[in-house]
Image (cartoon, coloured by chain):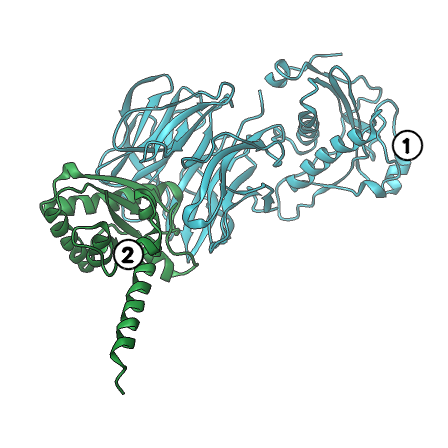
Chain colours: A green, B cyan
Amino acid sequence: MAIPAPFSTALRAAAMLFFVVVVAACSRSSNDAVGLTGAGNLGPGGGAPGSQQEFIVTVGDRVFFTTDSSSLTSEAMATLDKQAAWLNQYQNYRVLIEGHADERGTREYNIALGARRSSVVVNYLVSKGVNGGRITSQSFGKERPVAICNDISCWSQNRRAVTVVQ
Amino acid sequence: MTLLTRRSALKLGLAGGALLATSPMAMAQLRIVVEGANFQPLPIAIPDFASSDPTFGREIADIVRNNLRRSGLFLPLDPASLPVKVGDVNGTPDFNVWRTSNVDALVMGSVERGGQITSSVRVWDTQQAAQVVGKSYNTDPNSARRIGHIVSDAIYEQLAGGTGYFDTRVIYTAESGPKANRTRRLAIMDQDGANVQYLTDGATMALTPRFSPNGDLVTYMNFAEGNPQVYLLQLSSGQQKRLANVGAMTFAPRFSPDGGTVAFSVEQGGATNIYSVGTSGGQPTQLTSGAAIDTGPSYSPDGGRIVFESDRGGSPQIYMMGAGGGNAQRVSFGQGSYSTPVWSPKGDLIAFTRQSGGQFHIGIMAPDGSGERLLYSSFHAEGPTWAPNGRVIMFFQDPGGNDGPRLMSVDIWGRNPLTVATESYASDPSWSGLRG
């Protein structure tokens, strides 16, 4: 059964808007760092080429780590490859790499672990041609989780490094 | 009247403490055996303190009762059930009345508020018909609660041995707001949770405050510059400054026992190593090297060694080295990971956080790693700090989810786990020495 075309378009638009809102919610701490814009202010779809929105939605602004690890997974490397290509295309941006840990560690150790993760991402982006002078990094340890619950479904989202374009 | 020099505290806010004259100065037997499987807290009767302001007399007695109860070593009896409701420090108690009420230990106190606060206290062994404590104290009028704590320490020291720990403060991280964007600021309070003061405004995150031995200088992790950096904060003046300019990020500070040096972590390029630097400045000394995470340094009470955590062997474990650096020996070998080692004030034990079996544990071990004992286990618990007598540990635990952390205490025998009441979520406790 075919859905009438106008309805289908509206549905797609609604789905796209929903997607943008979800992504915006997930990247809340990063958006705080650049000045949070309301979800309604985001452009349509993945954002204009070269926009911060495009970077967050289309390129992907974060990579995830396994427990206590700062090794890049193949998925993380694929994301960072796209980030490096985008950053090499749009040279006007500076980037902040935020390193985060999940809450299954002690506070001070996780501060160090967050720094180790952000450092790995910095080194990877530099190895892909991004000028190190454009990059700064900061560790938040376990102090800024994005997902709140008591199981691995949240912890795996919190073990992350977020590339914030500025 | 003999002037007590037990504490330098007496030189500051407290004008003096004196031994009370008494007739039966017999050596009393009454004493708590604090160790052992058959331990029973000592029932103790503490009538309201005699005072021309009975409310004040009750308030001070309540502080004493609460302290002694929370120690886990005493069982203060319900004041309403006592045969005598108000203390009398001038006469000798009618011991038969107290014996028939099954009271072995009796505290008779008085307190008056004038230009100064004066308090006298006698502790009696009713079975021996003998006085075990007889002291009086003067203090400035703003230190009413401290009188209660100092009296509590006197009772504790006489009946439980060792030194007390009630006339102390705790500095900690006060937390509020949603978990994903929580405000964290420094706060200080009496060890029983009273007299809370906030030291930072929460505009930038502040974590892991630690007292210097003199109780006036604090070192902590400040996020005001972006990456966390170690700061020194003087409580009396409110002045603060960054400790050292080294590496990308500095954190995990702790004072040396003489207060002149801070050991801390320095992160550079993902590697974290331990350094030390004088509190008055100078060039930091690098104590560890390599690509691992070396953090959580804590000095031995003699200042000669540093215990710390490192993941150089894979998971975080506890290591020991000289205070000047050099070869480190691994100390912890149990399953899981070990972190946040803290040397006890007596030097006999190291408290730590262990993670194993999906749980966090607060534990203690000898400095050579032997005799490990886990004192408290839960979904999350970390960050032990020692009471100055080395018998009680405070830490924080978090039930997870959208809830937040709370301070808890437990004794080194694993008895008496208690929540320490705070008006907000609280973490990172650091216990002061006895106040000076």
- Are there few (<14), some (14-19), or many (20+) residues within 10 Å of tag 2? some
- Tell me which residue sits at (62%, 28%) in the image: B167
Say the numbered circle drawn on residue A66: 2
- Determine if residue B120 is in view: yes
Q: Amino acid at mark 2?
A: Thr
* Residue at the image point whose x is 23% and y is 40% from the top: B270
Name the amino acid type tagged 1: Asp
Q: Residue furthest bottom?
A: A1
Query: Which residue is rendered at x = 34% and y = 30% of the image?
Result: B264
> Where does residue B107 sit, x and y in percent of width and height?
78, 31
Tell me residue B273's x, y (percent). Answer: 28, 34
Give the position of the N terminus of chain B as an image quadrant: top right
Along the horizontal axis of the image, is A103 left or right of B291? right
Q: Which mark is residue A127?
A: none
**Callout 1: 10 Å neighbours few (<14), some, many (20+)?**
few
From this view, report whether residue B26 is shown above or below residue A155.
above
Does B376 appear above or below B134?
below
The disc placed on residue B94 is 1
x, y percent for residue A37:
33, 49
